[in-house]
Amino acid sequence: MNQQPQDRVRSLLEEWADAIRNKDIERLMGCYASDVVAYDMMPPLEWRGAQSYRAAWEQGLAMPGSFEVELYEPVITARDDIAFAVALAHFDVRPPSGEAYDGWFRWTAGFARSNGEWKIVHEHSSVPIEMESRTALIDLRP
Amino acid sequence: MNQQPQDRVRSLLEEWADAIRNKDIERLMGCYASDVVAYDMMPPLEWRGAQSYRAAWEQGLAMPGSFEVELYEPVITARDDIAFAVALAHFDVRPPSGEAYDGWFRWTAGFARSNGEWKIVHEHSSVPIEMESRTALIDLRP
């Protein structure tokens, strides 16, 4: 009960990754504040509110086979009741048929504690782009 | 001198946008902490440290003609000596010859105050992508 904010946020990130691995949409959505603003890898430009953002995750978790996301050594900055975290992240997809694939993306999140509970209030996931050819660079590695 | 953290961060964002508009690389780099980690719209996957990130901005500001970035109603969350900010952002490019163009992107930043000075310690800029065709969606509007 006396955990430091940084440890609480780290636990929340483990819960988040575990919920994705288990494709547990209820546990996953429990990590987000109801007014979360999300900038996802895929369109639209932004999601406003957990109720709408849920649609993005439902689609993501509906993929057959296994799907894992690992935050690589996230750096968490926390004070009092707010925090932000920054990490390169690795995803790994193994469809039941067809080839497995994986890749890296950039992940930033903001957090707030409300009524003693830490939640993700902002999430931003992306890959860089090649501007002239308008190509998404999904094969970059750290 | 007695400004609230939120106001100090807002001033820093105005300084940042003004430095870009004036193509003043020194003023712009003065907004960043020396150990900033940046996830830019263009590759690489990440920039580590202001000294290396400077190269990205030098290239950006070298474009002929005018170049403006406006953060649209940034939401700033600040406590004590840390903060994060979230905004959709609009860029507007007007080359001396050729057609003007503009667009929207997503912008997230983390801040820390050190020795009384607020600096950007993290910056993340991106557009969504269409995964199957690997297309960068640079024409989306809010």
Image (cartoon, coloured by chain):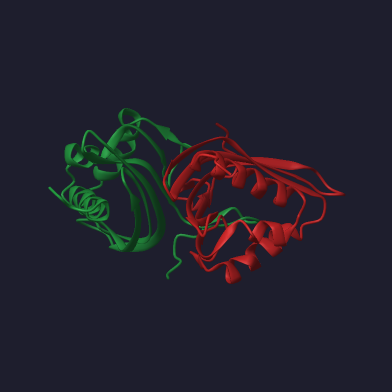
Chain colours: A red, B green
| Quarter residue A140 falls in | top right
Instruction: Identify the image quadrant of the C terminus of chain A.
Output: top right
Q: Nearer the viewer, residue B114 or A113?
A: A113
Residue A31 in the image, given as x and y percentages of width and height: 61, 56
Task: Identify the residue at image location x=76%, y=61%.
Answer: A62
Tell me if I can see residue A131 in this picture: no
| Quarter residue A119 falls in | bottom right
Residue B5 in the image, given as x and y percentages of width and height: 26, 51
Task: Identify the residue at image location x=51%, y=39%.
Answer: A4
Q: Nearer the viewer, residue A52 or B141?
A: A52
Task: Identify the residue at image location x=62%, y=55%.
Answer: B131
Task: Identify the residue at image location x=58%, y=33%.
Answer: A141
Tell me if I can see residue A92 in this picture: yes
Instruction: Identify the image quadrant of the N terminus of chain A.
Output: top right
Residue B45 in the image, given as x and y percentages of width and height: 49, 38
Query: On the rendered structure, is A127 left or right of B53?
Result: right
The answer to whether B22 is drawn above or below residue A121 in the figure is above
Q: Nearer the viewer, residue A66 or A50?
A: A50
Q: Nearer the viewer, residue A93 or B33?
A: B33
Give the number of callouts.
0
| Quarter residue B59 falls in | top left
Give the farthest residue toward the right.
A97
The answer to whether B133 is drawn above or below residue B35 in the figure is below
Residue A18 in the image, given as x and y percentages of width and height: 71, 46
Give the farthest residue toward the left.
B1
The answer to whether A74 is drawn above or below residue B71 in the figure is above
